[in-house]
Amino acid sequence: MKTIKFAVVGTGWVAGEYIKAISSLPDAELYAIVSENKQRAYEKLATYQLQAKVLSEYETAVRDPNIDAVVLCSTPDKRVDQMVAAAQNGKHIVIEKPLAMNREDLRRIQEASEKWPVHSVASFVLRWNHSFQNTRALIQDDAIGRPFLVNVDYWHHVGPQYGQFRWSKTRESGGSSMLSAGCHAVDAIRFFAGDITEVTAYSCSTWHQSDYEFDPNAVAIFKLKNGGVGKISSSLECKTPYRFNVHILGEKGAIMNNQLFTHKLPGQTDFATIPTILPDSGDVAHHPFTQEIEDFIMTLRNQTSSLCSMEDACKSMEACFAIDESIKSGKPVKLP
């Protein structure tokens, strides 16, 4: 069975997790790291005691016939052009979120995917979290019936303690509370309850003095295609430990994070707790990148869709843009 050879683009915090994930799998190989700062790339390799090529030019990577797939964890301003170039050169793609910073660039991604179809996975990485997997399986097994009210919270104080803060706090590279990180909560709503048809949203600042160039706090209310409603909150300047709350009311039961109340247990008198790994840390080392890459490789070999294909992820991004549009206009926004 052919080993899948990867080039990881970028040397930031999340790039290290992809490097660890790839190097831990028997049918994957870290073939190259792509970075304009070659010294940082060599330091990354030394950290994990690995050997790989170091390339300073992205074009060299996508034209290298030995490379099967690229992992795009570069900054958002470069990601769209890199995705298009990878598809054009027949490279399979792992792409970090946000996929794009505006609808025009998202359309470029969609058009490139249609014109040069390659295998892809978008890194809404919490889809591979164990608690997320349990919740999804329970819903698909009719444990709570149709989800009619879904609430998801993304609370994470992203400040100077994170290296990315130097660019993620800006309107150009961070974009908004949703584009910077709250998009994980938007994607979670879709993962559990299906597509969103309409959005109404609001945002606010935290303090008079803030380094953020946009409101770091936002709340959105959704109409769902299944007839239900959803709500998300996203805060990047909260004075609280990291929290990712998932509360779902269904016609036949309810789920609160890893707690279940279901019609399938007729003698149940209170929520039952399911021991599992919760999405309860902002540390990327806690996130299931290994499972994401495993899924990517397996679906690539089987020629099936990954758990978060580019097409599906674009729908979550559309909802994020609709949230920001509603915040700006003060009006509801319908999704296609």
Image (spheres, rainbow, N blue to C red):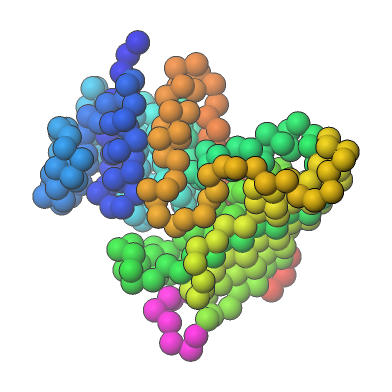
Residue 325's place in the image compared with 336, above or below, is below
Residue 260 is situated, as x and y percent measured from the top left of the image, at: 73, 45
In the drawing, does residue 42 fall left or right of residue 166?
left
Q: Residue furthest bottom?
A: 208
Judge by depth and name the residue closer to the eye, 279 or 336: 279
Residue 154's place in the image compared with 298, above or below, is below
In the drawing, does residue 67 fall left or right of residue 245?
left
Q: Residue at x 60, y 74 (%)?
A: 203
Q: Residue at x 43, y 76 (%)?
A: 213
Q: Which residues are drawn in magenta?
A: 207-214
Residue 90's place in the image compared with 253, above or below, is above
* Residue 247 in sight: yes
Number of labels in the image equals: 0
Q: Quadrant of the N terminus?
A: top left
In the drawing, does residue 286 fall left or right of residue 36?
right
Give the main secondary structure, helix, strand or loop, of the magenta stretch: loop
Judge by depth and name the residue closer to the eye, 109 or 21: 21
Residue 310's place in the image compared with 282, above or below, is above
Q: Residue at x 50, y 16 (%)?
A: 302
Residue 210 is situated, as x and y percent measured from the top left of the image, at: 43, 82
Residue 67 is situated, as x and y percent measured from the top left of the image, at: 27, 26
Q: Quadrant of residue 262?
A: top right
Residue 206 is situated, as x and y percent measured from the top left of the image, at: 52, 81
* Residue 328 in sight: no
Q: Residue at x 44, y 17 (%)?
A: 301
Q: Is residue 146 magenta?
A: no
Q: Is residue 212 magenta?
A: yes
In the drawing, does residue 336 fall left or right of residue 158?
right
